[in-house]
Image (cartoon, rainbow, N blue to C red):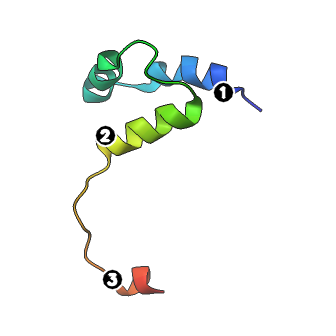
Amino acid sequence: MVSEAIRCRLFPTTLRNEAMAWYQSLAPRSVSSWRDLTEQFCRHFTASRRHPKTVATLE
């Protein structure tokens, strides 16, 4: 299993364009764990609009 520290170090190598700009804009020491990093990333890049319900989402 890959450690949290390694995941955090490898994460920026997967980023491009807007995602890399976001990552580089993070304040130093603003991320305390892998979970924190993924939550911040998802919060920033996940749309906050509501999606219409479909039959598939109701099941």
Residue located farthest toward the top when viewing the structure as drawn: 28
Q: Amino acid at mark 2?
A: His
Q: Are marks 3 and 2 in contact (CB under 8 Å)?
A: no
Q: Classify 10 Å Cα crowding around label 3: few (below 14), some (14-19), many (20 and above).
A: few
For discs 3 and 2, the disc positioned in front in the rendered view: 2
Give how far across and how far down residue 34 sits, in percent: 57, 31
Tell me which label, 3 or 1, sits earlier in the chain: 1
N-terminal label among 3 and 2? 2
Task: For marks 3 and 1, give the CA distance.
Answer: 36 Å
Which residue does the image show at 42% across and 85% down from the upper left? 58
**Within the image, what quadrant is residue 24 found in?**
top left
From the image, tell me which residue sits under label 3. 54
Residue marked by disc 2: 44
Residue 7 position in % (x across, y down): 60, 25
Report x, y in % for residue 23: 35, 22
The residue depicted at 65 percent of the width and 20 percent of the height is: 6
Label 1, on which residue?
4
Badge 1 density bin: few <14, some 14–19, many ≥20, Cα 10 Å = few
Comes first in the chain, label 1 or label 2? 1
Q: Amino acid at mark 3?
A: Thr
In the displayed structure, 28 sits above or below 51; it is: above
Q: CA distance from mark 1 to mark 2?
A: 21 Å
Q: Nearer the viewer, residue 15 or 36?
A: 36
